[in-house]
Every structure is written in C-alpha cells, then in structure tokens.
Image (spheres, coloured by chain):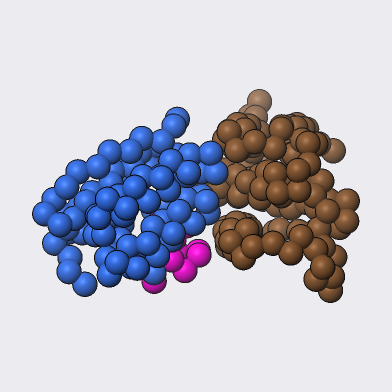
C-alpha cells in the first residue's frame, strides 16, 4: 500500500486527502505536497486522514512541519480523523493539543478558530 | 531464542516489510489481535530510527530485527550498528536538532505504546527491545 494524495479547494481552504500508509518511505511525498501548497499561496489547509491506514512519527513530523509553514503565513492546518488507531498516536505524543482535529471535512472547513 | 530473524539494508522502503513480518510473527506467537496495531507501529518506529542512524553514519551494515517467541511473551529486538555517544559524552555526532527531534519522537511513540521497553546503546551499536505478553493457544479438547 502506497500513499495517495489529492487536493481540492473549498473557498479559501485547501483540502488534502491522504490515503494509504504514511511512514519513513512515503512521508517525503506528503512533505513535498504541503510545501508546494504553501509555496503556491495556500495557507489554510485541511488534511483529511480518513483514508490513512498507517501513520508513524515520521508522518507526525511532516504534519508538524506543515503546521509551522502555514503559521508563518498566519494560516492554519486542520486534520480530519475519526480512526481510533490514528488518533491514539496523536494522543500519545501530545499532538492533540497542537492540531485541531475534526470529525468531517465540512466541520473543518467551517471552523474558524 | 529467536524464532525469526530479519536483516535488511538500511533503506526506508524496507521498513514496511519489517512491519508486516513482525506483525505476522506476533500474531502467530499469540499476541492479542487488539495489540497487533501497536506491535506494527512500535517495530516500524524502531526500524525507522535504526535506518536513520545507519544512513546518518554512512553504515552499510543491515539493520537486524529479532522476533523472539518465548513462553507467555513475545519480544522484538531491533539492532543497529551505529556508534552511540555514551552518556556524558557530548562530542558525538553533534548534529542537527531536527535529527534529534525525530529520533525522540520515535522513542516517545514507542515508550507510549509499549510497557516493556529496553533501550541500550554503546559505541558498537544500539538496540531497542520490546516485549508483549502472549495468550496461550486454546486447549485442545479431547
């Protein structure tokens, strides 16, 4: 299982749909995608993780890197995730306090704070 | 004794293979199904860390994974051959914070997931040994 990525724009938000496994091998692709979006002026990102089967600390590092980049432009990075096994990794590392985590893309897009 | 031993070149693409093998052997050993996700993640973290250490140190030796089935427990030991700075020695690899941060994040995930973890490091390499309890196979009724 490789990593799949697709993007979609909703107003001033850019949705990044991620599928498959995010690990030390595939995380660089996600990093490139986030860097490219920020370089192209998309500063409000919603990363939809519903299709993610596996996430490790390398993936977390990429998401934190993305957050730092958008924040440098007063932007935001929100996550969409309902999978307990993925949420658990955010909890163990304390990153639930760093990322706003939503239950749906619609909710994340509507969120303002 | 090790029931399965895996050696792989220190390349990111092989970490997934190590995860799959470890999970398969753990299942066979009787590790609870509910814990297999944790086994997969923890071994992936340990292998990722070892691959990073080998690549950083330009070490061509493979990363070694021992999958050890014992009575009532299952252990995974991931060994690297990277020279680690011994405690108190600050003159080591002296490198970037980012490397150290990622290394720490991986270890944080492992220690958050696994109750029984032993991390050892010396000048000839290090290892992370993680142990999970196993449930004995159901008794066969005669």
Q: Position of residue B26 (x, y in %)?
A: 64, 38
Q: Which residues are the magenta region? A: A87-97
Give the colour of chain A: blue
Looking at this view, is B65 or B138 the one in front? Answer: B65
Asked whether, in this view, residue A21 is left or right of residue B91, the answer is: left
Asked whether, in this view, residue A77 is left or right of residue A65, the answer is: left
Question: In the figure, B2 relative to B114: above or below?
Answer: above
Residue at the spot 48% in from the left edge and 44% down from the top edge: A28
Image quarter of residue B121 = bottom right
Give the colour of chain B: brown
Was residue B86 drawn as part of the magenta stretch in this picture?
no
Q: Is residue B129 visible?
A: no
Q: Position of residue B28 (x, y in %)?
A: 64, 32
Tell me the quadrant of the picture where the C terminus of chain A can be found: bottom left
Q: Position of residue B42 (x, y in %)?
A: 60, 50
Was residue A92 drawn as part of the magenta stretch in this picture?
yes
Image quarter of residue A32 = top left
């Amino acid at each position: 299982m490789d990593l799949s990525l697709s993007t979609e724009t909703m107003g001033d938000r850019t949705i990044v749909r991620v599928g498959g496994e995010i690990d030390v091998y595939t995380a660089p692709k996600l990093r490139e995608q986030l860097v490219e979006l920020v370089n192209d002026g998309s500063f409000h990102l919603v990363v939809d993780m519903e299709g993610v089967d596996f996430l490790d600390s390398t993936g977390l590092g990429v998401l934190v890197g993305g957050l730092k980049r958008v924040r440098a432009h007063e932007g935001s990075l929100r996550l969409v995730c309902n999978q307990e096994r993925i949420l658990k990794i955010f909890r163990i590392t304390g990153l639930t306090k760093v990322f706003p985590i939503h239950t749906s893309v619609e909710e994340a897009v509507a969120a303002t704070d | 004794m090790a029931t399965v031993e895996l050696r792989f070149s220190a390349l990111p693409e092989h970490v997934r293979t190590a995860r799959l093998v470890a999970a398969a052997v753990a299942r066979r050993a009787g590790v609870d199904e509910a814990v297999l996700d944790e086994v997969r993640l923890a071994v992936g973290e340990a292998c990722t860390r070892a691959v990073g250490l080998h690549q950083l140190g330009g070490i061509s030796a493979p990363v070694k994974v021992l999958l050890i089935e014992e009575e009532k427990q299952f252990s995974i030991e991931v060994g690297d051959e990277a020279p680690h700075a011994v405690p108190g020695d600050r003159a080591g690899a002296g490198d970037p914070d980012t490397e150290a941060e990622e290394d720490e994040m991986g270890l944080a995930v492992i220690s958050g997931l696994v109750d029984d973890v032993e991390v050892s490091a010396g000048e000839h390499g290090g290892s992370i040994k993680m142990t999970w309890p196993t449930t004995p196979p159901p008794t066969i009724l005669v």
